[in-house]
Amino acid sequence: MDKTPAPIFRKQRPLIPSSSVAPSSSPAFGTPVHPPKPFSINAPKAAILPIILPPATLRPLAFRTFTKKHSLTLTSSALQELASFIGRHCGSGWREEGLAERVLEEVARSWKNRNGGVMVEGASKELQDILKTLEGNMSGGKIMGQGRGLPRGDSMLEINDNDTINTRLGIRPTTLPRQDSNVSFGMSGLGVQEEADDDEDASDARAWLKVIDAYDQPRLLYNVDKKHFERDTAKPSLLPPASHKTTVFRNRYHVIHQRLLRNESFQTSSVTSSRKHTLQRSLSNQQSLRITPIANLLGRHGSNHMLLGQLNILPTGDLAISDLTGTIALDVSQAVAIPDDSAWFCPGMMVLVDGVYEEEEESVGKGLSGSSGVGGTLGGRFQGFFIGQPPCEKRKSTLGISGLDGTDHDQTIGGGFGWIDFLGVGSERAVGSKMRRLERRLLQPAPEEDMPSRNRVVIIGEINLDQPRALQALRKILSLYAAEPEGTSPLTFVLAGNFTQHAVMARGGSGGSIEYKEYFDALASTFSDFPTLLQSSTFVFVPGDNDGWVSSFTGGASVPLPRKPVPEMFTSRIRRAFATANAEAGNTGVQGSAVWTSNPSRMSLFGPNHELVLFRDDISARLRRTSVTLKRKPAAETDGAPEEGNASPDLPSASPAVEDDAMDLDSAAADKPSSSSSLPLDVKTAQKLVKTILDQGYLSPFRQSTRPVHWDYASALHLYPLPTAMALIDTTAPPFCITYEGCHVMNPGSILVPGRKGVGRWVEYEIGRLGKLRECTL
């Protein structure tokens, strides 16, 4: 096929100079005295003389653009910022030439695409970013091209001088502007759309590594009417009103409920429903499951139902289950977990319960709950027979994208949230394919199996700096990686607390603020012995419950999540060690850095392609302390028990394959139905922990009195969509590396192995693959 462009679209030849123009022989068209100048397509751009534009003069035009056209409200500070910007960049022609209207239109559209809210604040970071973006693209008072934060080709005000002239000459423009913008769908969060062309020459994958603090993560709420995630426009606070606690519960319920409705077992088929027998009411015989709101139980005594709700404790001390419509007492004395002993069930968790409603005249603890009936505590009780965790959803199903496992051709599945930017690094459908191309170019696999590769993350947990042996073990681990060939150092080192044995500044055994500063100074001196690692890797520090400042008033108890990083005043010498190492190397590219992040936090590599959750919590011990006791199946009935697909159809039913240090829960061993009793206790404990956390889709599935949560930042605790990997540092659980529903969960435990003197342990995770436990002798 001939791909030669038509003559009209070819590159035009330079115009013939005026000196070579042949004079006309016609008297009517005689040669002029002064020869005509050649037609210049790219005319020189006039300079703009800045003016002082009063906000009151700009107010009518701004009101027309923002309020009447885009339904936005400008504050006086925002109007002042816009007037100053237009006067500086558009000059005296802001009204006659229509320059200000174009700028206001672009600002209003960019504000709405960023979900900035109805009120446009002048001091907001979003408005400053928009104006900074436009400032780099203003020339002669006009918006000449796209900048950072604006997707290319997505602005209806995109003006190209060549296209304007071609249009006058009757030539079709080479680029057609589109009126729809994809900024709200994650086109501009990471800057991939804008930076990819400029940074194509970057050879270090750390240029695409981003650590996302829990306080900087986008706060998203699920809209039931639109079936879409939206940004929470309210200003967050550490002391919010009590209504925000209800919002946290409502959002958790909505996310899990819509996740269940997307499950095949909860989707009703018109063909199978017509053939279903009316007597098949039990859970084990139904082909499609249906969730009943608690308020709909009234007047339906003796009927079988499945409930989705949160386990709570009534004022009388009895167990109850609550959803958005009400609360009812729950009897689990005869309930059996599906699958048997595969997960924890604690107050504060969202669970699926199948059983029978037994109506009584009075509710349990009448008068203590404050309300009764619909919206309150219902009379009677719900006798549960089966209880299970709501099955989680794989990441690629949530995002609606297939071909994420290294295939070159990405295909779109119906539905999903692929356009949602969950972390502020760009959405999957917007930048995913481009990031995968960058990953294949920058993260080359090791040429040989024995050779170390660059795409590794080293996870070290529970580094008690007040223990000399912990620093000795850390020095040994760093020396192993420093001895590797040049250019093969790991991308990231994750160092998790607690950085002291006891709560610091709480009159405990770990001392006060002076001793705390000395501990990090000793850590800085250890880092200084390995300058090559400081220059080529990123060190991420995740605090624990014993770290300051919050430990000064909790005394080592559970602190509210998310918790802020260690204050900079204690870590100044560590930052100085990195600055010294970078200065000695003279590296002009991506320099080594120390990142002090919150707990929990996220680490993103190549945008939405790789998401690693970092979480430090002794959650296993808390689950054992607060779990609900259920009825155990007899050994004889275990083999003939109904499949767990009846309560949670997508839960893995078979034992995982145990290979070295990695255990894959996704692969169902249908060939050999081995019982769970044949697994080692540590493996079974790890499976139970991982399944509970990922099925809940929440890092703190407990009551507020057990594990407090900042209500306005609770969205940072959601595990939806499932991350590609998760570092769950828990010293009360055995170390493990497990894959469940495509999410690889790792727990290195403490750096010092309990009961084994002189042994250090950590996890080495190969990005996109599996992690492995490693040990060394001190």
Image (cartoon, rainbow, N blue to C red):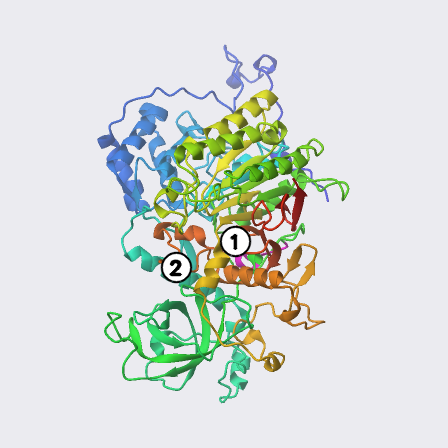
Is disc 1 surrounded by few (<14), some (14 to 19) or many (20+) residues within 10 Å? many
**Numbered range of the magenta stretch:** 397-403
Residue ID for mark 1: 418
Q: Does residue 540 appear left or right of residue 135 in this picture?
A: right
Q: Does residue 15 appear left or right of residue 117 in this picture?
A: right
Q: CA distance from mark 1 to mark 2?
A: 19 Å
Say the numbered circle drawn on residue 251: 2
Point 63% across, 31% down: residue: 201
Residue 579 at x, y percent in the picture: 53, 25
Magenta stretch: includes residue 281:
no
- As shown in the figure, which amino acid type bears the numbered disc 2? Asn
Element on which disc 2 rests: helix
The N terminus - image quarter = top right
Residue 139 at x, y percent in the picture: 43, 26
- As shown in the figure, which amino acid type bears the numbered disc 1? Gly
Q: Does the image show residue 258? A: yes
Q: Is residue 761 above or below residue 102?
A: below
Residue lying furthest top in this view? 33
Q: Nearer the viewer, mark 1 or mark 2?
A: 2
Q: Does residue 459 appear left or right of residue 499 in this picture?
A: right
